[in-house]
Amino acid sequence: MGAALHLLDLATAHARERHQFGRPLADNQGIQWMLADMASDLHAARLVCYQAAWRYDREPQHRAGVAAMAKLTASEMVRRVADSTLQLFGGAGYRKDEPIERIWREVRAIRILEGTSEIMRHIVARDMLRKSPHTEVPISPN
């Protein structure tokens, strides 16, 4: 979450400060939508992690599944945010002296360490299939 929030802050500041064709990048609807998607993805992933923590304490039989779902959601979210931030910065974002370049590379490691996204999907599916005959995943604590 921290890396994604930092990237979103960098992208927002850049969109406000960088001018092309006599106006800020932030005036372009496509850039606004990119920032909105990044913020929405971050918010959604944060909520998934909060709910996973809540369920982890209350449903010990599903700890692996909810933890895997949170890691999968958050790691895929930070990948999208990193890619969008790099896209927004263009070639400047890929320079070694820019923090985006370093964060973009580190984000790849996040998706590998402690289990790849594919492994997280396997754990989530296994947990779902182990439940009762219906495989509903509750979206709110009951």
Image (cartoon, grey):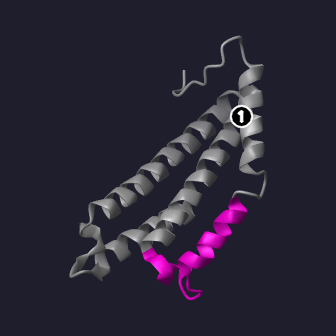
Q: Dominant secondary structure of the magenta stretch?
A: helix
- Asked whether residue 141 is in view, the answer is yes
Which of the pair 78/95 is nearer the observer?
A: 95
Single out the residue that lies furthest toward the top. Answer: 133
Horizontally, residue 115 falls left or right of residue 97, namely right
When the figure is inspected, residue 35 is found, relative to residue 91, above or below; the finding is above
Span colored in magenta: 89-110
Give the mark count.
1
Residue 119 on the magenta segment? no
Q: Residue at x 25, y 76 (%)?
A: 24
Which image quarter holds the N terminus? bottom right
Looking at the rendering, which quadrant does residue 138 occupy?
Answer: top right
Q: Residue at x 34, y 56 (%)?
A: 33
| Residue on which the image places disc 1 | 124
Q: Position of residue 136 (x, y in %)?
A: 61, 20
Q: Position of residue 41 (x, y in %)?
A: 47, 50
Q: Position of residue 16 (x, y in %)?
A: 29, 74
Instruction: Specify the amino acid type for callout 1.
Output: Val
Horizontally, residue 102 falls left or right of residue 109, namely left
Horizontally, residue 106 falls left or right of residue 89, namely right
Q: Position of residue 137 (x, y in %)?
A: 60, 25
